[in-house]
Structure formats: structure tokens, C-alpha cells
Image (cartoon, rainbow, N blue to C red):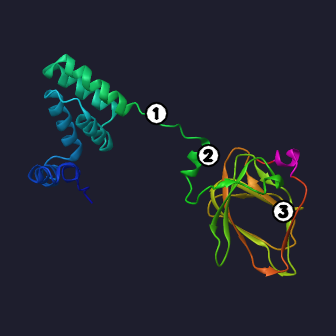
Amino acid sequence: MKEKIVQTAGRNQLGEFAPMFAHLNDDVLFGEVWNEEAIDVKNKCIITVVSLMASGITDSSLTYHLKNAKAHGVTKEEIAAIITHATMYVGWPKGWAVFRLAKEVWDEEVPKLTEKDKYQNSIVFPIGDENPYGQFFVGQSYLAPVSTEQVPVFNVTFEPGCRNNWHIHHAKSGGGQMLLCIGGRGYYQEWGKEAVEMIPGKVINIPAEVKHWHGAAPDSWFSHLAIEVAGEETSNEWLEAVSDEDYGKLK
């Protein structure tokens, strides 16, 4: 759906003092001309910047239209070329003046994404905060509640190389846990068995009273949804850490 340009600055600033001007600014200029479809909004932004530059307008109105141009897809390289080209026709001092404003608009510092941010962008569920059960993990993990009603569901995220200790979900009846893998690559291992690779879409059913551990692969972030299976007299027993030697055998 095409974006509709809406402006209220005229009425906000001059509605009582100059209602006709406010109407022309908000309803005609921005309401009709800016929404006319023969020229797309990006090109209208460019035309407006060059027009104001040619007129010697280098105040907040030009800054507004430079920001509008950036918001509608004009890149730093494009605005530099536009201003340089227009300078050849409208004058060197105007070019310098507009470049000073454009540099402020396009040179805003954009924080670099951390590895955690990049991984967060690859999964649907939030990573959450540092895991409050971190003393039972080797490496850094995170915990985010996905559902706290009906059936509790938590997203557990492991940084590369992170894994939880061996542990057992006890229950008099029922109990256990389900893991739904949603991102990255990890491993699940039951005591006395080979480790099982976990990738998105893999579901692990963990019966009660089975000693096991799970976590990320050495070279990958990993996330799974943890669902506690209802049972009678349930509890969780944390045991020894997975040794570096045993974990190092995984690929």
C-alpha cells in the first residue's frame, strides 16, 4: 500500500493566526501535491532539497527535507552527488551550506550490531536477559519468558560453547521436559548415549528421571523453547558440569 504523506505543521503553528496558509500548507502542498502519484516520494524529496538549495534556504526547513529524503531512501552517496551537481548551477556557497546540514543528517552514528543482536535478528522469539540459573551453566546463557499462563514456555539461548550441567527432571508421575529448537545449532545428550544434534525444527522429548544436558555447538549460537511437562511432585536436580574433554569431542 502506498504511503500517504500527512502534514499538520501549518495548523499546529499557524492555525489560528493564518488559517488559509495552514490549509494551503497541510491540505494542498502536503495533502495533494506530495501525494500526487506521477512522481514517487523519493524523487519529490530530491526536487524539494534542490529547490530550497537554489533559493538559498538553509534553515530548519531544509534540514527537515534532508531528513525526509533520507527516510525515503536517499543514500549518503546519492545526496552527496545531488548537492555536488546542483552546486554547479546554483553556486558554491550554497553547496557548502547544504553540505554542512546534510553531513549532520547522514553522518549520524549507527551502533554496530553485536553478535547477540545479529543472532536476535535471526530468530522470532526474544533472547531475553542473562539466565538467573547461570551457576548451572558453562558459558553465557539467556532466558526469556514466552508464556507464563496455562503452559509455561521459556526461550533459552546459549552463546557458542555454552551448555548446561547434567541434570534430572524428577517426578512421581508425568513430568519431564520438551525442547523445541528455534535457532542456531546445538546438542542434547542423555547419560550413556551419543549426543544428538539439534537444529531449528527439531523436537526433543525428555522423560522424567533421565540424566541429560543440552546446549550450543562450539561454533554456533543456539536457542530452544523449554516446556515443562506437568507431573506430580516435580523437581529439578542439577548435577556436575559437562567436562571440556567430553564437550570437545563434539563437532
Mark 2 highlights which residue? 116
Q: Nearer the viewer, residue 103 or 191?
A: 103
Q: In the rendering, at what x and y percent does residue 173 appear?
A: 84, 82
From mark 1 to mark 2, how far is it between C-alphas?
19 Å
145 vs 42, left or right, is: right
Mark 3 highlights which residue? 212
From mark 3 to mark 2, how far is it between C-alphas?
26 Å
Give the amino acid at mark 1: Glu
Give the amino acid at mark 2: Lys
Q: In the rendering, at what x and y percent does residue 70 appear?
A: 32, 39
Where residue 43 sits, quadrant-wise, is top left
N-term mark: 3 or 2: 2
Q: Secondary structure at mark 3?
A: strand
Residue 239 colored in magenta in the image:
no
**Within 10 angstroms of label 1, few (less than 14), some, or many (20 or more) residues?**
few
Q: In the rendering, at what x and y percent does residue 27 appear?
A: 14, 55
The residue range painted magenta reads: 242-249
N-term mark: 3 or 1: 1
Q: Secondary structure at mark 1?
A: loop
Marks 3 and 2 in Cβ contact (< 8 Å): no
93 vs 213, left or right, is: left
Q: Secondary structure at mark 2?
A: helix
- Identify the residue at image location x=85%, y=72%: 235
Where residue 101 sits, quadrant-wise, is top left
From mark 3 to mark 1, how far is it between C-alphas?
46 Å
Closer mark to the observer between disc 3 and disc 1: 1
Q: Nearer the viewer, residue 191 or 241?
A: 241
Closer mark to the observer between disc 1 and disc 2: 1
Mark 1 highlights which residue? 109
Marks 1 and 2 in Cβ contact (< 8 Å): no
Q: In the rendering, at what x and y percent does residue 113 appear?
A: 55, 40
